[in-house]
Image (tube, helix red, strand yellow):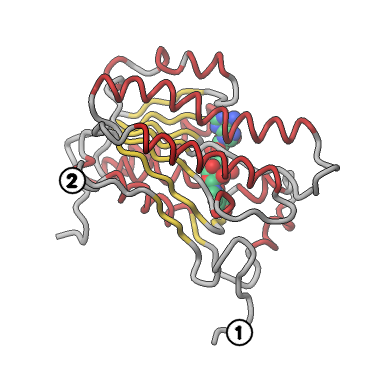
């Protein structure tokens, strides 16, 4: 008997944005393992196709008869026109979506205000905020018609706590928090659930993207402590989705054991 009941996921259909790497890829695979169908969305088509194959393998290994359908949609969430075409790109037999995981997002650089490139500011807002909102607008209409659904947004500790060198990223994640909390209030008279997952330090491609491909700068972020891995956050997402329909996990803040805030962490000898 498993510790928690994930049987409610079996046969459900889940969209995961940013499913080509890190948290999104791990989430897609874990939903597949739980017997869900998954629509994987990201810009790198060959990479989401490879993750979809991992989903198929995980589903096969689970031995579950429900689920096992996987589709990939190449999409840039920051491109409004392409988001508008998302619905048409979802195969007919996967259109009855139950869960949306708004995970696509990134941070670029650690520059201070005054020296941040316009294109970096615009890119982060267009993806983390406007992209998340566009995809949500599309799916919330479907969930309202269906009278069921779950929107799970990837916030961050950066959405609760600003820090120097993260002005734009923290502003985007504060916006995600405000948007998510407002939407939860708007949907309070519906069966639609709204969750915000707020990770601390997770070692994925995130810091490699932040440091523009400099893998040694990215490694330094996690030096001396054990960061979370993508699967740790995927477990929280899937756990929230698997709660009974009357339970809404509103927010989950997840740190590695040696992190206590956006900037407070411990890398010394263990006490
Ligand atoms: N890692 C952390 O420490 C951490 C902490 C707190 C919150 N988060 C949040 O968790 C989420 C996932 O991050 P991660 O750590 O898993 O990072 P990651 O490994 O870099 O993965 C990011 C994913 O987002 C996708 N993506 C980026 N821009 C996109 C766009 N315009 N359209 C579609 N997909 C896009 C990427 O795919 P393509 O490049 O193929 O498009 C990739 O699949 C992000 O929202 C991030 O802000 C991460």
Q: Circle 2 sits on which residue?
A: 7
Label 2, secondary structure: give it: helix
Residue 161's spot in the image, x, y percent? 60, 55
Residue sitting at x 49%, y 57%: 229
Q: Quadrant of ligand 1?
A: top right
- Identify the mark nearer the N-term, 2 or 1: 2
Specify whether 143 is left or right of 215. Answer: left
Question: Where residue 25 sits: x, y (%)?
Answer: 46, 42
- In this orientation, which residue lies closer to the viewer: 115 or 97? 115
Where is mark 1, residue-wise? Answer: 269
| Residue 60 against residue 134 in the figure, above or below | below
Mark 1: which secondary structure? Answer: loop
Q: Among all residues in the image, which is located at the extreme left? A: 1
In the picture provided, is 44 more to the left or to the right than 117? left
Where, quadrant-wise, is the C terminus in this rendering?
bottom right
Residue 226 or 47: which is nearer the viewer?
226
Which residue lies at the image location 50% right of the left edge and 54% below the top edge? Answer: 199
Quadrant the N terminus occupies: bottom left
Q: Which mark is residue 126?
A: none
Measured as percent of width and height from the top left, residue 155 is found at: 51, 46
Decide if residue 241 is in sight here: yes
Image quadrant where residue 59 sits: top left
On screen, residue 132 versus residue 10, left or right, reads right
């Amino acid at each position: 008997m498993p510790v928690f009941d994930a049987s409610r996921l079996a046969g459900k259909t889940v969209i995961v944005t940013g499913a080509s790497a890190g948290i999104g890829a791990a989430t897609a695979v874990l939903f597949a393992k739980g017997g869900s169908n998954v629509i994987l969305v990201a810009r790198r088509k060959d990479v989401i196709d490879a993750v979809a194959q991992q989903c198929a393998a995980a589903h096969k290994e689970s031995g579950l008869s429900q689920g096992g359908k996987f589709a990939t949609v190449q999409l840039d969430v920051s491109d409004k026109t392409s988001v508008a075409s998302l619905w048409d790109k979802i195969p007919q037999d996967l259109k009855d979506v139950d869960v949306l995981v708004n995970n696509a997002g990134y941070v670029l650089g650690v520059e201070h205000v005054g020296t941040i490139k316009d294109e970096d500011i615009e890119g982060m807002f267009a993806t983390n905020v406007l992209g998340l909102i566009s995809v949500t607008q599309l799916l919330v209409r479907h969930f309202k018609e269906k009278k069921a659904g779950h929107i799970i947004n990837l916030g961050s500790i950066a959405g609760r706590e600003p820090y120097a060198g993260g002005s734009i990223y923290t502003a985007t994640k504060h916006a995600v928090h405000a948007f998510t909390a407002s939407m939860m209030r708007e949907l309070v008279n519906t069966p639609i659930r709204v969750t915000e997952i707020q990770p601390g330090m997770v070692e994925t491609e995130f810091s490699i993207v932040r440091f523009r491909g400099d893998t040694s700068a990215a490694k330094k972020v996690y030096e001396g402590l054990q960061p979370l891995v993508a699967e740790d956050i995927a477990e929280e997402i899937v756990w929230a989705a698997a709660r009974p329909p009357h339970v809404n996990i509103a927010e989950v803040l997840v740190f590695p054991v040696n992190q206590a805030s956006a900037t407070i962490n411990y890398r010394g000898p263990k006490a």
